[in-house]
Image (cartoon, coloured by chain):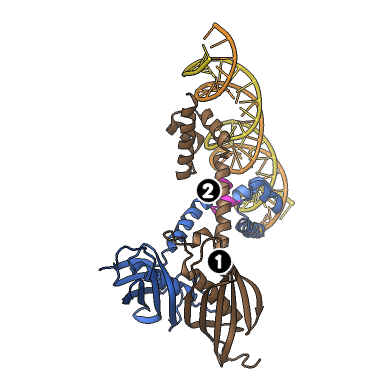
Chain colours: A brown, B blue, C orange, D yellow
Amino acid sequence: MNSTRKLIRHEKLQHLLHDNPFMTDEQLAKTLKVSVQTIRLDRVALGIPELRERTRDMAEGAQAKLRAIDKKDIVGELIDLELNKVGISTLKITPDMVLEKTGVARGHYMFAMADTLALAVVDAQKALTGVGNVKYKVPVYAGASLVAKAEVTRRRNDKYFICVKIKNNNEEVFRAKFIIVSLDDERKQEE
Amino acid sequence: MNSTRKLIRHEKLQHLLHDNPFMTDEQLAKTLKVSVQTIRLDRVALGIPELRERTRDMAEGAQAKLRAIDKKDIVGELIDLELNKVGISTLKITPDMVLEKTGVARGHYMFAMADTLALAVVDAQKALTGVGNVKYKVPVYAGASLVAKAEVTRRRNDKYFICVKIKNNNEEVFRAKFIIVSLDDERKQEE
DNA sequence: CTGCTTTTAGTACCAGCTCATAATATCTGA
DNA sequence: TCAGATATTATGAGCTGGTACTAAAAGCAG
């Protein structure tokens, strides 16, 4: 078979580019001991774009990812908010949020989601989580669409008592109670 | 002044490239209404590399950053570990971990640090956080070097009771208690 | 040997530059 | 007002890392 060599080379090519996407056709040709033209044909056959395009794609994709991580700062998407009363947010569990060993979502994503939402419902310029009390009821796996609901259950001066429940498909998977301390110097003590 | 225009253009140039680093000299020349050569001279003067180099730098840098974020998966650096007994980890609070409004570190970093460490000390292939109980004692600001210490306080079958204390400069800033459930099918029930 | 795929070679062309050299344009101080 | 400095534009050669196309050579199978 003549084409087995080709197939092997294609695999090697993909491997090489996976390890180091910054290789030129010339370098690839040298390491695979074929001509540059063969590499070009292989790239076309495999749908691999040229070095510059690969580089650009990475740069753009990376920017997007970094922005996504910035957005992760919100930890979830706020979809409803009644200040000092209730708040609702959603969060999609992606494969990179799970523990490798178990495939279960890392606990602190739920915690962060709940914490962030709890802080959001508190109508204060500056607020800090004081204490938290969390319970993981059901393991969550990648792909889950979580919905968190936070309710202010009590308020005493600068302290807010907040209960957050996270559901996946109407099944409660997580529950937390927070005491959040408002650091507003004076400001609204009424309402 | 002849050079004020130049200075203004330099600023605009940097701004433009900050917003969109993928602009060619030609595009820049058109938007700034000067010749391509002027743009080149400006770039040289400002030490701004050409489009391709910028793209490549971004792609490489982004890879590094993404890897760093992967590492963040550990949330802290494990520096000592006695399985089923104690574990110690460190975490440096960087400016991107703080709330804009207050400059205080977001609570879930400490939570994640504690949770991760708690999971690490449990000598099980698969383990899950069951319940947690956290208390934020002192606000933490950027630059803080946190040290977390986790101790297994009790163990009942597949349940581990773990206490985690986080200190900043010997001052306890955070404390948490976890109950972690081991999911090991059978395996070590001794030790 | 013939026909097929595979590989290599060569040419023309492109974007997006660098580098060097020169010509204008613009301003500035005496 | 005019020489001299500074800024801008123009021009051309050369580079990298390709694409697109054509054609020749090599390898192998029936």
Between circles 2 and 1, the one closer to the viewer is: 1
Distance, label 2 to label 1, CA atoms, is 26 Å
Type of amino acid under label 1: Lys
Q: Is residue A100 above or below residue A184?
A: above
Farthest residue to the left: give it: B191
Q: Residues within 10 Å of mark 1 (few under 14, many from 20)?
A: some
Is residue B5 toward the left or the right of residue B78 in the image? right
Q: Residue at (56%, 93%) from the top-left corner?
A: A157
Mark 1 lies on residue? A72
Left or right: where B77 falls relative to B14? left
Q: Which residues are magenta?
A: B42-56
Q: Position of residue C28 (x, y in %)?
A: 65, 58
Amino acid marked by disc 2: Arg
Q: Residue at x 53, y 28 (%)?
A: A37
Label 1, secondary structure: give it: loop
Counting from the top left corner in percent of width and height, residue B82 is at 28, 68
B95 or B185, nearer to the observer: B185
Question: Residue A40's x, y, as percent?
Answer: 55, 32
Q: Is residue B168 visible from the viewing direction of this image?
A: yes
Q: Is residue D12 above or below residue B140?
A: above
Chain bearing mark 2: B
Find residue A171 and report its horizontal and vertical position in percent: 56, 71
Residue B69 or residue A178, whichever sits in front: A178
| SS at circle 2 | helix
Task: Pinpoint the chain carrying mark 1.
Answer: A
Q: Residue at x 60, y 58 (%)?
A: B18
* The residue positioned farthest toward the front in the image shown: B186
In reply to whether residue A182 is colored magenta, the answer given is: no
Q: Is residue B49 visible?
A: no
Residue bearing mark 2:
B56
Q: Residue at x 49, y 32 (%)?
A: A7
> Residue A5 shows which numbered tag?
none
